[in-house]
Image: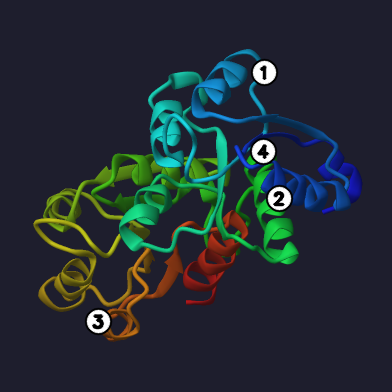
């Protein structure tokens, strides 16, 4: 990623604090980002985006008129802006507050204060979303892969499908939970399953155990994309037969590297 690439990014900074605005803008300027517009509230952000859609929205969590979560919901409910790149910079640590934003498929969630390298990584991810690299595999053609995406969040399903589609994967089937996925697996064969962990009806771990043990399918790669951070829970998932685990929000390059490993090296 070169300075010239970063200089092309247009960023809308939604930050009511003048101090935080200066800090974030300074970090962006340090990396050569110069196209930075700023607003103080969610409503101002929506009005600005309608006129001048940016490449990336960077928002605080608490805005005078709404939360970052509410702003993101409004954006994703508008067809023209449902795939707009969004990054949160917040001192919020509560899982209940951050999880809806993780599920929505944001570029990154950074703490206050944040490390400069983490911001740089998020900018790199934004460029990857804007100009994605097609998935090149030795054993598969990306456009021939059949993928099943399992997640109870429609926003998360759509986001994962967009990322896969940008990599050249065309055949993507979606399921709302483990039981829905099993029904689809009984009707069709897939090359890859990407599943969330925490879902109603049947969660991701139960789905994996059903596939590996009840169905006797030990070979299909299963990637879990989850916001779960409980070490004991994740250890149990690893023992259930998952091929790889990836955090939400994820970077396309990270997913690409995992797919190389689970599809080619396997």
238 lies above or below 166: below
Residue shown at 15%/78% (left/top)? 213
Residue that mark 2 sits on: 123
Q: Is residue 7 visible?
A: yes
235 lies above or below 176: below
Residue that mark 3 sits on: 240
Query: How far is the residue under mark 3 from the one under mark 2?
Result: 35 Å
SS at circle 3: loop
Residue that mark 4 sits on: 130
Residue shown at 32%/74% (left/top)? 219
Q: Is residue 133 visible?
A: no
- Mark earlier in primary sequence (4, 1): 1
Q: Position of residue 166 (x, y in %)?
A: 56, 41
Of tags 1 and 3, which is closer to the observer?
1
Of tags 3 and 4, which is closer to the observer?
4
Q: Position of residue 197 (x, y in %)?
A: 27, 65
Residue that mark 1 sits on: 52
Of tags 4 and 2, which is closer to the observer?
2
SS at circle 1: loop
Query: How far is the residue under mark 4 from the one under mark 2?
Result: 11 Å
The N terminus appears in which quarter of the rendering?
bottom right
- Mark earlier in primary sequence (4, 2): 2
Task: Check disc 4: other Cα within 10 Å, few if <14, some if 14-19, many if 20+.
Answer: some
Picture quarter containing residue 251?
A: bottom right
Picture quarter containing residue 120?
A: bottom right
Of tags 4 and 1, which is closer to the observer?
1
- Mark earlier in primary sequence (2, 1): 1
């Amino acid at each position: 990623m070169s300075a010239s690439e970063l200089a092309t990014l247009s960023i809308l900074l939604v930050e009511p604090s003048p101090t935080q605005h200066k800090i974030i803008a300074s970090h962006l300027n340090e990396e050569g980002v110069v196209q930075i517009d700023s607003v103080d509230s969610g409503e101002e952000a929506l009005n600005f985006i309608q006129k001048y859609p940016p490449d990336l929205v960077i928002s605080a969590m608490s805005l005078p008129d709404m939360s970052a979560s509410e702003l993101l919901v409004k954006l994703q409910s508008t067809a023209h802006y449902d795939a707009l790149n969004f990054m949160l910079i917040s001192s919020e640590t509560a899982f209940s507050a951050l999880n809806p934003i993780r599920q929505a498929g944001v570029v990154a969630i950074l703490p206050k204060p944040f490390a400069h390298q983490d911001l740089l990584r998020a900018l790199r991810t934004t460029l990857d979303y804007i100009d994605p690299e097609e998935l090149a595999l030795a054993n598969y053609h990306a456009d021939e892969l059949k993928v099943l995406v399992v997640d109870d969040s429609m926003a998360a399903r759509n986001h994962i499908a967009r990322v896969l589609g940008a990599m050249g994967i065309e055949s993507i089937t979606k399921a709302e939970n483990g039981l829905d996925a099993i029904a689809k697996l009984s009707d069709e064969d897939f090359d890859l399953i990407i599943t969330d962990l925490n879902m109603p009806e049947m969660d991701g771990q139960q789905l994996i155990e059903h596939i590996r043990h009840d169905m006797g399918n030990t070979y299909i790669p299963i990637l879990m994309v989850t916001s779960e951070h409980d070490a004991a829970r994740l250890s149990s998932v690893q023992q259930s037969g998952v091929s790889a685990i990836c955090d939400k929000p994820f970077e396309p390059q990270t997913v690409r590297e995992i797919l190389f490993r689970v599809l080619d090296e396997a």
